[in-house]
Image: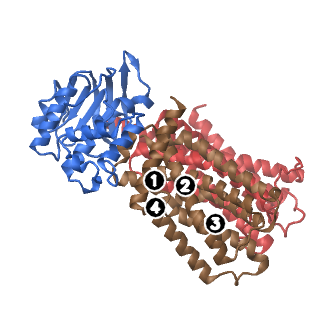
Amino acid sequence: MTDKAAVGIWHWLLGAWMVLVIYGAFFYAPTAQGFVGESARIVFFHVPQAWVSVLAFCVNLWASLRYLARRDPLDDARAAAAARLGLMFCALATVTGSLFAKVMWGEFWNWDPRQISIVILLLVYAAYFALREAVTDEERRGGLAAAYATLAFVTMPFLVFVVPRIYFSLHPDTLINVRGSIDMDPRMLRVLLASLVGFTGIFVWLYTLEVKLARVLIERRRRGES
Amino acid sequence: MSASTLVTEALAVFAKEVRSELRSRVAINAIGLFGLTTLVAVAYQIGPYQIHQQDRPHLLAALLWIIVFFAALSGLQRVFVKEEDAHTAKTLRLAARPLAVWGGKLLFNVVLLAALKTFLVPLYSVLMGMQVASVLPFIVLLAAGCGAMAATATIVAAIIARASRSGTLFAILAVPLMLPLLVMLIAGTRMAMTSPRWSDILPALQGVGALAGVTLIASVYLFPVIWHD
Amino acid sequence: MLCLAAVTPIVVTFSGLGKRFGSRTVLKGLSGELRPRRAVAITGPNGSGKSTLLNLLAGVMRPSSGSVSYLCADSPVPRQRWHALLGVAAPDMAVYEELSALENLRFFARLRGLGRSDGELERLLVELGLAARDVRRPVATFSSGMKQRVKLAQALVHEPAVLLLDEPSSNLDEEGHATISALVERLRGRAALAIATNDPREMVWGDERIHLGH
């Protein structure tokens, strides 16, 4: 089997997987207790989106550190691709979180610490791209963007882990709580984990496409110069 | 590399910054006047009588740090931006080790922020009727906030000085990084206003201290990369 | 007479040096070396990369290809020590205008851990053509020629083993050019020297020439 055929099969499998996830989110998983109506079903989409936005942030950091070490333009392209996708999933997580907040608490925005942390992640991504736009020299752009991404990464744990524990949060108890237990119906957990895998697959697919395109553009420029 | 030589070089940079600033007074005027203007505007509109007693700790803590934060944003980037504007950055780059430059300018920003707070916080207390239950923890919190804010502002200033040198870009880059710090400082200040116990302010102090620490460590590794092409 | 103490000889080698700005290649495959007691004149039309080459040799710019090394008795000098051995004066560099000429030199001497007295610093400025009454005035009040002299002074204050000069007598009158000419003649006796220039009067200072161009 050729690589192209294998990739094609993997894409079709991913599509089928996501169809199953959507079906499972609405028909297989039971209604959660303590939530307004069926609103808890948004967790199967909101949580994976938030997870992917953080995963993208980590990939952005990894690629940024590689760029600082090797100064390979492809690493800079990898970092930018991860940030673009991270921004997209972060925006989706914000929107789905707001929809849930409206149903659950009557307002789209409650200034809940977890809502704030996802918005600040959005601001970090936006700042990253504002910085990239402001620098015309490619090498300098890559270096400065990588430095900012690293700085943002070391600051984020305070927002995500420290601040919500200082303030009372409306946000539902996280899946893994201070008691170390998972408080979720087994069927719901299965659908959630399947959705996590699916959304991660979508991220990997889109990221790979962006990096392939960047590789082609870099190679074309190198050939043009030589 | 001898540690004392790096310290001596950093102190030379700091001394130069102080001498230059005392002659031009651009940053001092910017952050001092911005802070004063904002404080007067807030005090005039809100003052000590417009806030209900139960809301005072929360509102006064938040307003104080918002005023300090935006005053800091108006002037802390100058340490690096003025070097690029005056074409002295390359001269400095060739004459000093990166960490000496970073250390001297960080120290300058710490002193500048400390001066701003020394001037602004007592004035704020008088104009807004802010009363602090535990003074010493509050002063420690102010000092820790100084260090943390200056650490973040200095490294971000170094980044934007190599980019567009735009004040807007400085705010765009600095705000997301400083927001967790602001949240912790506001929480700590609120506690200092309502509780005489160190233990109540300790979580915020620990958070601010830890954030300052990681920012400083990250800066030590990142600044040479930012400073040199 | 400029008092120049003996310094450790440094050889600057560069091989396969290239620099690209976006899609524009400015330098490609450049190799050579700067040796003590030799002056190299770097010539070429505007935009040929003279200043870029000096920036690469000074280490303020990262090459797109190739490398630059500073060797002391055949051992490489770590990048973080170059600033102590290197003096650079270029049109895109300035000194601190709110400080006096003397304060500038004091600062740059301290940065390199040097304990130069005010008398020594003043002598350097005067020998570069600055009037004694001007050394304590803010540089902001200086003419462009006077600023150029202060710029040269900061490049020389630590008696560098490697000196990179980009159009050193620009903004200087005939007397200034003569001062620089005498300076180069003395420096040639100990330092590795590179001078980027389009001025025929400066080109003759080089024992050898690197010509950049299309």
**Which amino acid type is shown beneath numbered disc 4?**
Ala
Q: Are marks 4 and 3 on the same chain?
A: yes
Return the residue at label 4. B27
Q: Which residue is mark 2?
A: B111
Residue nearest the observer in this picture, C195 or A48 = C195
Circle nearer the N terminus (1, 2): 1
Read off the residue under disc 3: B65
Q: From mark 2 to mark 3, how far is it between C-alphas?
A: 17 Å
Instruction: Tell me which residue sits at (39%, 36%) in the image.
Output: C62
Secondary structure beneath dot 2 equals helix
Closer to the eye: label 1 or 3? 1
Whether pointer 1 and pointer 2 mark residues with C-beta atoms closer than 8 Å, the reply is yes
Question: According to the colouring, which chain is brown?
Answer: B
How far separated are the C-alphas under marks 4 and 3?
A: 19 Å
In the image, residue A150 above or below residue C62? below
3D distance between C-alphas at marks 2 and 4: 12 Å
Q: Within 10 angstroms of label 3, few (less than 14), some, or many (20 or more) residues?
A: some
Q: Any idea which chain is the red one in this picture?
A: A
Dots 2 and 4 on the same chain: yes
- Mark 1 / mark 3, whichever is N-terminal: 1
Q: Say whether marks 2 and 3 touch (CB < 8 Å).
A: no
Between C108 and C130, the residue placed more toward the observer is C130
Label 4 lies in what chain? B
